[in-house]
Image (spheres, rainbow, N blue to C red):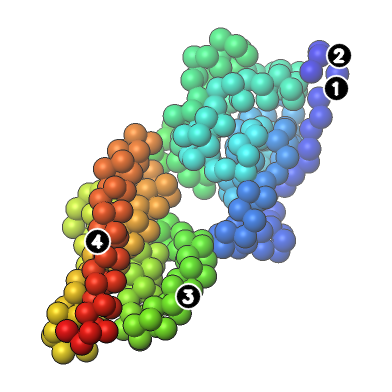
Amino acid sequence: MSDAQTPTIFATSSSLSLNHHWDHFLARMGWKRMQHLVPPGLYALGSPDGDSPVFVSANYTLSFDALRSALIDWNAYILVLDTKGVNVWCAAGEHTFATAELVNRIVETGLSQVVNHRRLILPQLGAPGVSAFEVRRRSGFSVEYGPVRAADLPVYMQDHRATAEMRQVRFDLKDRLVLIPIELVHTLLPMLAGAFVLYWLQGGWAALSIIAAVLAGTVLFPILLPWIPGREFSPKGYWLGLAVMLPIAIGMAQMGGWRWAGLLCGLAYLLFMPALTAYLALNFTGSTTFTSRSGVKQEIFSYIPLMAWMGGLGLFFGVLSSILAYWRF
């Protein structure tokens, strides 16, 4: 944008309509995941002037709406970056909530013509993607990192100081519960299809096993996360899957009369299903700031091969048990 051009400023408010809440619901359910976004650019909240603060957000609707709804009765500008519909923390890791995008958006919106000051307030979770030094060198704007949660901004803005509580990243029960629907929706059809196939092949216990494994990984795991032994998510998921699957495996062995076919069938499910639960639990490493980008990669490379081996052995013993059952061994 040249200096002669008039900056384009979109109007917004801190009020959320039923349509906004419906959009949030669909986003939480994973419906058209990458389409819950707002156009990047500069937004006027209330009636800001040249001295009003400038907040920076991602163009994911939940991130943008959380920010503006926290600023009730405020006059401010919101600079929305093009993060491809991804939230701040994940976008910082993917380098879309980043230095280059922030500097480019400052230029394209003509922000220097709109405000008299040169200060931007970014969410703390965007820090991994933004170099404050580079932003200042390339745009003249200084970067100030606000609190983790947008809801704390009104208090933070009183003296631009964050308390220890404002800097703390939580992943409490409420935060974990909101993640369940999207994980469950994505696994629901495969789970039902797998249950149908296993029921047709080996009966009700087999169908129950895959339902239990999936629900353990998508529902029980986030609920019980702090109390499951271990630190890394994959082993936590494995121990949970093993605990859930053990009584089912015993039931399957008992149904087989404790013969070789029944014992191998139980062993097959003890190998395969906890590995499935561990894999689903691993998905939550991308939903919490408890794990770093490097930590997630390390866990993937460490445990995915092990899960694959366990799954393969489980399939082998499952086929072998079916052969033995056919010969009544």
Q: Is residue 196 above or below residue 80?
A: below
Type of the residue with mark 3: Leu
What residue does disc 3 label? 192
Q: Nearer the viewer, residue 229 or 58?
A: 229
What residue does disc 1 label? 6
Q: Secondary structure at mark 3?
A: helix
Q: Position of residue 225 (x, y in %)?
A: 29, 59
Q: Earlier in the sequence, mark 2 or mark 4?
A: 2
Q: Is residue 58 above or below residue 250?
A: above
- Give the mark toward the camera: 2 or 4: 4
Quadrant (top left, top right, bottom left, bottom right) of the N terminus: top right
Viewed as shown, does residue 207 lie left or right of 270?
A: right
Type of the residue with mark 4: Leu
Q: Determine whether label 2 and label 3 are within 8 Å by CB.
A: no
Residue drawn at 27 percent across, 72 percent down: 318
Mark 2 to mark 3 CA distance (whole Å): 60 Å
Mark 3 to mark 4 CA distance (whole Å): 23 Å
Task: Point out which mark residue 4 bears.
Answer: 2
Q: Position of residue 128 (x, y in %)?
A: 44, 29
What residue does disc 4 label? 313
Examine the rendering and report whether any part of residue 152 can be seen. Answer: no
Mark 2 to mark 4 CA distance (whole Å): 68 Å
Q: Residue furthest front?
A: 327
Q: Is residue 85 above or below residue 49?
A: below
Mark 2 to mark 1 CA distance (whole Å): 7 Å
Q: Residue furthest top?
A: 137
